[in-house]
Amino acid sequence: MKIFICKSLEGFSHNSRLRISKIFTLLMLIVLLPVIYSCAQQKASKDSKMLSIKKKQHTKNLVLGEYLEEINGVNLYYEIAGNPQGPVVLIMHGNPGINSYPYKQIFGKELEKELCLIYLDQRGMGRSECLKEDTSFSIKVIAEDMEMLRKKLNIDKWIIFGHSAGVFYSYQYVKKHLDHVQGLILVDGGFKGPGLLTALKILTGKYEQRLFYDKNKSKELKHIVYKEGPPYVQGLSDKLMWDFFWFNAGKHLKSINVPTLIITGKYSKIYGFKKQSLTMHNKIKNSKLLIFEKSGHFPFFEEKKRFVKEVLNFTEKYF
């Protein structure tokens, strides 16, 4: 092409040849740009379809239903529910002794439209096998139960949802298995225990806490937890007490590089979780902090509509 242009310009002055060459180059660009743009659009469309297909492969090996299976040496109850094409979210409940039932009752119907939720009754709780005297029970063991469940279900990566004590389990899991974590949803929990002074206040009954913005909500939630669902298991909080008091995942926060949604209630007053949420947000790179203005320790209950909206916005954006 270059030789042809040069030959066809013989007889013209040097400056004329330069002007004609520039005009010819410009005309070629005008002709070729639509073709280049069309190819780019086709590639982008193809890539978009590939991403869309990839999103729809989250639960290809999972079967919806309820299960009671031996995992890590104990029989654990779990339920797989929701959208079989959605991102997989493991629900880690709080308060040793309760179970996953209240979470399903409160927000399951709404979140299951878009997400595939795995409700786990942690070892010794709810519909899982009761603990024997010699059964291991600690934050580390519960985190290993989570990993054993992931392997059993053949899930590559999942989103971990933790509330209250469930946030501790989530952090313990992340410390060892971050490569299998797609994202985190951490609701009114902390990365470290309350420490010695608060521990002494709790043990002596002098610790004052606030769990609700609207105290009238307390009766409604207690009915779901203690009347509707499986029986509360007494004594498990005592077994994990010292584990909770001395737990500290602070040095691992900066290493977390997955999308993280942190939610706390403005009126939450329990173990300094609200203050810790701000620290978590400042240290976890790709995190978003939301403070629910009319909530205490249970934002997903007191402000359910906003909670559902924010969680779905988060999962839609990243997964």
Image: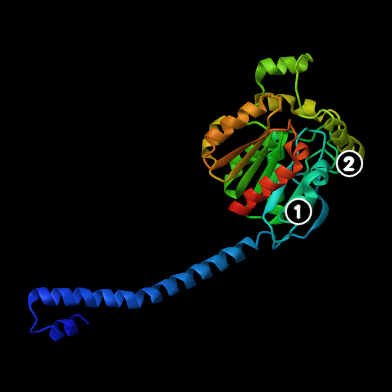
Badge nearest the viewer, 2 or 1 = 1
In the rendered image, residue 170, in percent from the top left (x then y), is placed at 66, 39
Mark 1 = which residue?
Answer: 112
Considering only vertical position in the picture, is 169 above or below 36? above
Left or right, 217 with reference to 146: right
Residue in the image at 47% along x and 70% along y:
41
- Quarter of the image where one finds residue 232: top right
* Identity, as a three-letter code, of the amino acid under mark 1: Glu
Considering only vertical position in the picture, is 198 above or below 307? above
Few, some or many C-alpha atoms within 10 Å of disc 1 (few <14, some 14-19, many ≥20)? some
- Quarter of the image where one finds residue 14: bottom left
Residue in the image at 57% along x and 48% along y:
179
Residue in the image at 78% along x and 49% along y:
108
**Residue 88 in view in this figure:** yes
In front here: 312 or 125? 312
- If the image is split into quadrants, where does the N terminus sit? bottom left
Q: Which mark is residue 231?
A: none
- If the image is split into quadrants, where does the C terminus sit? bottom right
